[in-house]
Amino acid sequence: MGCISGGWPVEVKEYKHQKLLFEGDIHVAAYTTLGRLTNAYQPYYHSEMEFHLVCQGSCRYFIGNVNYQLQSNSLAIIHKNEVHSYIGTSGLRSKKMSLIFSPKLLANRLAALEIVNNLNSTHYIKLSAKQAGMVELIIQEIAEECRLKEPYWQSIVKDSIEKFLIILSRAQLNTDEMPMEENPLIQDILGYLDETFAEKISQSDVADRFGLSSSSLSRMFKRYVGMGFQRYLMHRRIIEAKQMLENTDLKILSVATAAGFDDLSTFNRDFKLLTGISPSIYRKISL
C-alpha cells in the first residue's frame, strides 16, 4: 500500500480499530472506526480499492480534487491510485466501517469484475437502511473469517465481497446527485497544481495567479483539502516520487528532480518525514 502517513491524529478519542489482512500478495483489510475526529488523515494512495460506509454521524472525503460530504448510510469509493484523505467532522462522534481489497482477488468472478468496472467513475453511493445493514454485516463477516482462518475461509471472503459489490450495484441505480462541496475556484487551483507541482512554484505565486492573498489560499486549502497549501504541495510531490520509485529505475536524484524538489537533501528529509523511511529503502521494500 502507498500510505504516506498512517494512523489517526492524536485528537481522536474513543477509537476502535480492527484490521485483518488476506495472506499473500493479494490481500483484504476490513476494519471499524469509532471516535471523535478533529483533524484529517494525510493524503495517501494505494493499488487496492477502498470502500467506507458511514454508519453514524458524518464526515468528508477528499478524493482526487473533489470534496465529498457523507452522511449515515452513505458509502465512499476510492479507486486504484486515487489520492485521497479523510476529513472528520470536528467534535462529533462517528462510526465508519471500511473494506479494502485488490480487484485481483476477484479473478474468474465475471459478475464481480463487471461491477467493479461499472463503478470506475463512482465515488459515492447512497444506501437504504436495509442495504446499509447488509453491508455492515458483510464487512463484519469478512473480518471474522480473516481472524479465524477456518477451512475454506478465503472462499467465503470472496463470496462475501461479491455479494457486497452486488448490493452496491443495485444501490447505484437509485443514487442521484453526489454530495460534493462545490468550490470551482479551489478545484481550478488543484487542477493547476496537478499540472505544475513539479515546477518551481510557491504559495504566493499561485495566490497571485488566482487573485487571492496568500493567507486566504492557505485557509481555503485547510477547509477544503484538510491541510495548508505548502503541506499539500509537499504531499503531492512525495506521492509522485513514490510512484516513480515503484515503477521506474530512475536514480533517486532524478526522481527528486522530476517530482519538483530543488535538492536531494530536501527530498530525503521530506520523504522520511512523511513515510518514516528513506527513498532508497522505500524502493527496496516496494519491489
Image (cartoon, rainbow, N blue to C red):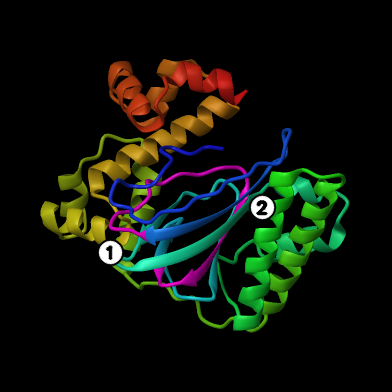
Q: Position of residue 197 (x, y in %)?
A: 35, 41
Q: Is residue 261 above or below residue 2?
A: above
The quadrant where residue 97 appears: bottom right
Q: Position of residue 174 (x, y in %)?
A: 64, 84
The quadrant where residue 159 appears: bottom right
Q: Amino acid at mark 1?
A: Ser
The residue tagged 2 is 143
> Could you say whether the residue bearing mark 2 is in a helix, strand or loop?
helix
Q: Residue at x 65, y 41 (%)?
A: 21
Q: CA distance from mark 2 to mark 1?
A: 28 Å
The verdict on residue 232 being magenta is no
Q: Position of residue 249 (x, y in %)?
A: 57, 19
Q: Quadrant of the C terminus?
A: top right
Q: Is residue 38 above or below residue 44?
A: below
- The front one of 177 and 154 is 154
Residue 66 visible in the shown view? no
Q: Residue at x 29, y 17 (%)?
A: 265
Q: Residue at x 38, y 41 (%)?
A: 236
Determine whether, in the image, residue 227 is placed left or right of residue 96: left
The residue tagged 1 is 90
Q: Amino acid at mark 2?
A: Ala
Magenta stretch in the rendered image? 36-59
